[in-house]
Image: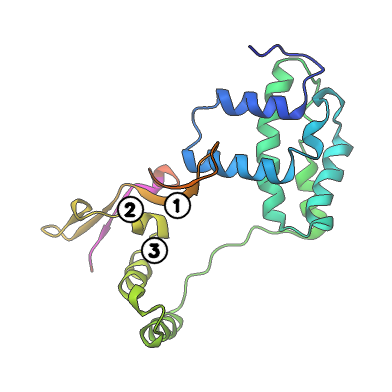
Amino acid sequence: NFAASKSQTLNDYFELYMSQTRRLKKTTRSTYRQKYDLYVRDTIGNRKIADIKYVDIKNFYNSIVYSNGERTATMLTVDSILNSVFRIAVRDDCVRNNPVIGAANELKAEVGYENTHKKALSKSEQAVLINYIKKNPVYKKWLNMVIYMLGTGCRIGETCGLTWSDCDFKNDIIHIRRSLNYTPDEHTKKYTWTVSSPKSKSGIRSIPML
């Protein structure tokens, strides 16, 4: 049983969050635990959650980006996790306010971080890539897969999760229904193959064969 108390640490509430949250996919749960264990558990995670203030979160994020030299995107993943954890603590009345709110945005402004839009390869760039793979003794075995991904825009996990039943040759349609990923187990850390639905609802789609 978990008794809400001001003596509970951030680590305690992280475990509570993970035990109560069922909406996270297995791959997401694995990523969250991996990031938490790497950056939070043995640092700010040992502190009593009631004692953690905004300035502590801001200093912690600064240490991730500046001291550890990690990408801002890594800090944003940690921010997403901590924001969810502190929301539970607020509801339990262990903390009055969520100290995470605003800290990430302030740091993003300081470092000049901007969300970058992915840029599709031009036809000439695709030709260069395909020509390189054709001639490379290591990568040429993946040529057909790369051509498929270039033509459909599928992610690597969606491509690996494709089965013959997803290919409607009568109507020339490819149905994207699942993703296959090689990820560590949340608890054992052992890497296993995991089949899940695509990253988002819009990921479930049909693509015409050209």
Q: Which residues are magenta?
A: 202-209
Residue at the far left in the pictured view: 170
**What percent of the width, then of the height, locates residue 151?**
33, 69
State whether residue 24 is above or below residue 92: below
Q: Nearer the viewer, mark 3 or mark 2?
A: 2
Dot 2 surroundings within 10 Å: few (below 14), some, or many (20 or more)? many
**Residue 161 numbered tag:** 2
**What percent of the width, then of the height, locates residue 114?**
69, 59
- Residue 155 visible in this rendered orientation of the protein: no
Write the residue at 63% across / 23% down. 16
State whether residue 136 is above or below residue 164: below
State whether residue 123 is above or below residue 42: below
Provide the residue designation for mark 1: 182
Q: CA–CA distance between discs 3 and 1?
A: 20 Å
Provide the residue designation for mark 3: 153
Amino acid type, label 3: Gly
Q: Indicate left or right for 113 with 178 as reference.
A: right
Q: Nearer the viewer, mark 3 or mark 1?
A: 1
Amino acid type, label 1: Tyr
Answer whether residue 72 is magenta in the image: no
Dot 3 surroundings within 10 Å: few (below 14), some, or many (20 or more)? few
Q: Nearer the viewer, residue 117 or 138?
A: 138
Q: CA–CA distance between discs 1 and 2?
A: 11 Å
